[in-house]
Amino acid sequence: MLPARFDYQRPETLEEALFLLDRYGEDGKILAGGQSLIPLMKLRFASPAYLVDINRIPGLGDIKESGGKLVLGALARHNEIADSDVITARYPLVASAAPQISDPIVRNLGTVGGSLSHADPAGDWGSVMLALGAEVVVRSSSGDRTLVIDDFLRDTFTTDLRPNELLVEVRVPAPSPHSGGAYLKLERKVGDFATVGVAVQLALNDGHVATAGIGLTAVGPKNLRARDAEESLAGAEPGDAAFAKAARLAAAAAQPQSDVRGSADYKRHVVEVFVRRGLARANQMAKA
Amino acid sequence: MQITVTVNGTERTADVEPRLLLVHLIREVFGLTGTHVGCDTTNCGACTVRLDGTPVKSCTLFGVQADGRSVTTVEGLATNGQLHPIQAAFKEEHGLQCGFCTPGMMLTGAALLEKTTDPTEDDVRWAISGNLCRCTGYMNIVKAIQAAGRAMQDEKAPEPAGAAS
């Protein structure tokens, strides 16, 4: 399949990239891992006049801890995240989600910044970042904006990014000592979009739930935060009763649609089961 | 756009449209047809090549993105007329039926074996989960990759004392 013609630019610095985005405005599109954008261009669902390839900008894919946060550079590849020692050691939700994205070869190129900016409701990172209370930093030639992920993900394939802005990093708060997290995903086969995905993060304090974060994948117009479920857990005694109640509330918050991957009722049921299982798993980690 | 790509160790230049996919650059401009176009939708992995050593689906990358980088295709596996261990193992273990997925399977398998020459069956199945075999001949593909790993260990291992060579 042949995409429509476009002009290709490969800036070597962030400044140069931002200059180009200013110049191209709505006609420009950023090329990161390209694992969603290029298929869309081949199908001619997307036909940007200008493509700004950011893959050669040094440092944009760094993974590090800084100021009590995990900082993921926009270009961090899914497989680099999966293989990161600091993430494996301290961020179990991130570590469990990364290897479940698409397939191993796609994960070699696909990036966290590209995935979030694409804002596919079946994308996995959005739910993970909702559950973790992450922020994103977006940059333009006029400066930075820091947005909580809830405000960044606005609608189906729609973010708060302006045409001249680039998502440069994702900041994930370091989990508290007694915490755990997990990502559960149902897919028909490796590489398929999620039928349902659930991200769960749980923090305990003095034997009670301090905070809970729950993000839902592929069951709404965008990645959803199961707010009622989160609130029902705050202060609760961690255990089957509280988890079952939260799972019911999360299922009620889901807005699934029937499609080839399953009926709406089925997907809602999977949300409930996954939230219950995810909370139980996170609780085990938090108590360990 | 003028680009230079090191293909299987040889520097090649081409003047291409930015929209030309890497797989078409390899097949049609460089004339290396061992890299196959399967689904053309990022699913099947038949077009897998290694970009600076990393397996990528060459139908989901523009040729211009390979400018200044090195690409290894199935034609680059053998050296000096000697099959790469993974090629020898696919032959020995009947790791192919129709052969369409084979180049991608071997390149993905070779990348895995550079990390570990002793992968478990699960490791292999996980590593090749982005490469589809429409013949469903996975059993022998997995066996071939593991056999290649053993062959690579033997190559590296010192000869036991007194062994005839």
Image (cartoon, coloured by chain):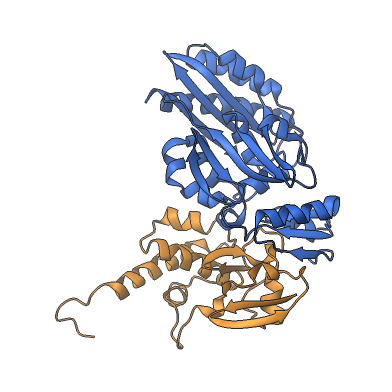
Chain colours: A blue, B orange
Q: Residue at coordinates 41% horizontally, 25% vertically from top-left?
A: A177
Residue A246 picture quarter: top right
Q: Position of residue B74 (x, y in %)?
A: 55, 76
Is residue A214 shown to the viewer in this render?
yes
Viewer-side residue, B163 vs B67: B67
Q: Nearer the viewer, residue B146 or A173?
A: A173
Residue at the image position 61 percent from the left and 15 percent from the top: A231
Residue A77, above or below A214: below
Task: State which quadrant residue A127 falls in.
Answer: top right
A16 versus B68 height, above or below: above
Q: Is residue A147 left or right of residue B98?
A: right
Q: Answer with left or right where residue A91 lies relative to residue B136.
A: left
Which residue in the rendered view is the most extreme toward the left?
Answer: B162
The x and y percentages for residue A47 are 84, 57
Q: Say how many tags the image has.
A: 0
- List the single residue furthest toward the bottom: B81
Task: Describe residue B157's horizontal placement relative to residue B149 as left or right.
Answer: left
> Residue A52, how many percent across, how many down?
74, 58
The picture places residue A178, in percent across and down from the top left corner, at 42, 23
Quadrant holding the N terminus of chain A: bottom right
Is residue B21 placed above or below B78 in the rendered structure? above
Q: Report the residue at 67% width, 59% height from top.
A: B42
A228 or A118: nearer the eye? A118
Name the residue at the front extreme: A142
For the C terminus of chain A, the quadrant is top left
Q: Is residue A31 visible?
A: no
Q: Residue at x 70, y 26 (%)?
A: A254
